[in-house]
Each structure stands twice: as C-alpha cells, then as structure tokens.
Image (cartoon, rainbow, N blue to C red):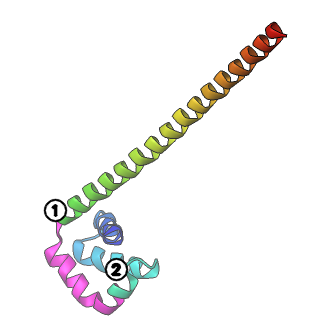
C-alpha cells in the first residue's frame, strides 16, 4: 500500500505542472527508476497508465493516507508507552535502591545499639 501511495503522490506532483495524460507516464517512469512497484509497473505499464488516467481513485488515495497516518499514530503511541514504562521502572528501581540503603543503615544502627 505504501508504494502505491508513493506512486499516487508522484502522479499528483507531476499533475501540478503537466496534464494527467503527461503526468502518469512520467510518474510510472520515475517509480520504475526508483524501484517503486518496479516489477508490477514493468509488467503492466500500459494498463497502469491507461487505468491511472481514466480511473484515478481519489478515495482510495485518501483512504491509504488515513491508514498510513493511523499506523504511524499506533507506532508512535506504542513507542511513547514503552518509553514511559522504562522511565517508571527506572524510577521504581531507584526507589527500591534508596529503601534498601535505608534498611541497611537502620540495621547498622540497630547492630551498634545492641552491641
């Protein structure tokens, strides 16, 4: 899906300066050159160009953009959650070390008192 989006982005980019009939072949050539859907485009170049010119699916493009954003959001949230968990664990470990040190200090005080 991501490579399809790259292709569509390139069609849109070229469409700013060229007609759709000119932009699509330029985008196809660009994608082949940059290894984006290369095998598929080489095998189906004429059909892809024809389909892209006459049946460009704006809704599919928008849906793919939303899906990519959603996936990026999930990944970002998971990463943030992991970082927060690490921070909490580190904080708890430091608290435990401090309490262990305090226990040891109190034990030594008791030992001195009892001797």
Query: Residue at left 22%, top 88%?
Result: 47
The residue under label 1 is 59
Left or right: 26 in relation to 115:
left
Q: Position of residue 21 (x, y in %)?
A: 23, 77
Marks 2 and 1 in Cβ contact (< 8 Å):
no
Could you tell me which quadrant the N terminus lies in?
A: bottom left
Q: Going 40% across and 77% down the picture, which residue do you hit?
A: 36
The magenta region covers 41-59
- Residue drawn at (71%, 22%) of the image: 101
In this view, the residue in front, 41 or 29, is 41
Q: Earlier in the sequence, mark 2 or mark 1?
A: 2
Q: Is residue 4 above or below residue 16?
A: below
Q: Which mark is residue 28?
A: 2
- The main secondary structure of the magenta stretch is helix
Q: Can you say whether 66 is above or below 44 in the image?
A: above
Magenta stretch encompasses residue 61: no
């Amino acid at each position: 899906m991501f490579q399809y989006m790259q292709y569509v982005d390139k069609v849109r980019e070229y469409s700013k300066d060229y007609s759709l009939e000119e932009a699509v072949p330029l985008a196809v050539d660009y994608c082949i050159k940059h290894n984006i859907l290369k095998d598929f485009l080489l095998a189906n170049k004429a059909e892809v160009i024809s389909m892209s010119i006459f049946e460009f699916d704006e809704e599919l493009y928008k849906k793919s953009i939303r899906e990519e954003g959603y996936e990026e959001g999930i990944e970002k949230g998971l990463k943030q959650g992991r970082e927060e968990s690490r921070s909490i664990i580190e904080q708890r470990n430091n608290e435990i070390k401090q309490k262990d040190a305090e226990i040891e200090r109190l034990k030594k005080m008791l030992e001195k008192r009892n001797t």
